[in-house]
Amino acid sequence: MHELAVTQEILSIVLAEAESNGAKRIKKVRVRVGEMTAVVGDCVRFYFDIISRGTIAEGAEVEIENIPIEARCSACGRVYRASELDFLCSFCGGIGSLISGRELLVEGIEIDQSGEGSGNKDS
């Protein structure tokens, strides 16, 4: 259930960024989530809907981009999809180095600065 703590941090980041940009409302939140974080996007959306009530983020769409685990083989240099437990290269059997899959970040937010129109703020 670490998604609740993660979602609280996401909301905190989003509210601080929106406030510093004079937002009246947050319309959309874009989050990148790597497979290795074991964060479940549907849980983040669920918790965000609950904990954002009464804030300028209430009703905001939460868009989750899932990032697969990818590695680069140290022997042949190929990039391949890996699993949490297996970093062996599927092409040559070499050992890979992680290049993606640990991300957990707020990629951007879409805000309304006037209370009626639309505005964009990428962070």
Image: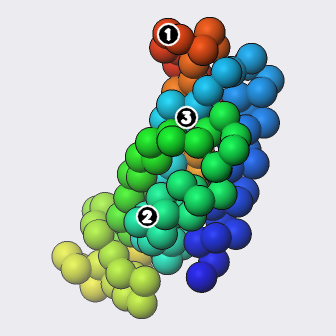
- Judge from the rendering whether residue 69 lies leftward or rightward of residue 3; answer left or right: left
Given residues 119 and 88, the one toward you in this image is 119
Location of residue 99 in the rendering, given as x and y in whole percent from the top left corner: 47, 61
- Evaluate whether residue 101 shows in this view: no
Marks 3,2: beta carbons within 8 A: no
Residue 123 position (above or below residue 41): above
- Judge from the rendering whether residue 30 lies leftward or rightward of residue 17; answer left or right: left
Name the amino acid type tagged 3. Gly
Name the amino acid type tagged 1. Gly
Q: Indicate which disc, 3 or 2, sits on the residue closer to the N terminus.
A: 2
Q: Residues within 10 Å of mark 2 (few under 14, many from 20)?
A: some
Tell me the number on the disc at residue 117. 1
Pick the quarter of the image with the C terminus. Answer: top right
Tell me the element at label 2. helix
Q: Quadrant of residue 96?
A: bottom left
Tell me the number on the disc at residue 41. 2
Location of residue 102 in the rendering, given as x and y in whole percent from the top left corner: 54, 65
Residue 27 position (above or below residue 67): above
Name the amino acid type tagged 2. Gly
Q: Nearer the viewer, mark 1 or mark 2?
A: 1
Q: Quadrant of residue 91?
A: bottom left
Residue at 77% in and 27% down: 19
- Judge from the rendering whether residue 4 lies leftward or rightward of residue 20; answer left or right: left
Whole-angstrom CA distance, mark 3 to mark 1, is 18 Å
Q: How is the image coloured?
A: rainbow
Residue that badge 3 annotates:
108
Q: Residues within 10 Å of mark 1 (few under 14, many from 20)?
A: few
Residue 85 position (above or below residue 21): below
Location of residue 111 in the rendering, given as x and y in whole percent from the top left corner: 57, 24
Residue 86 position (above or below residue 122): below
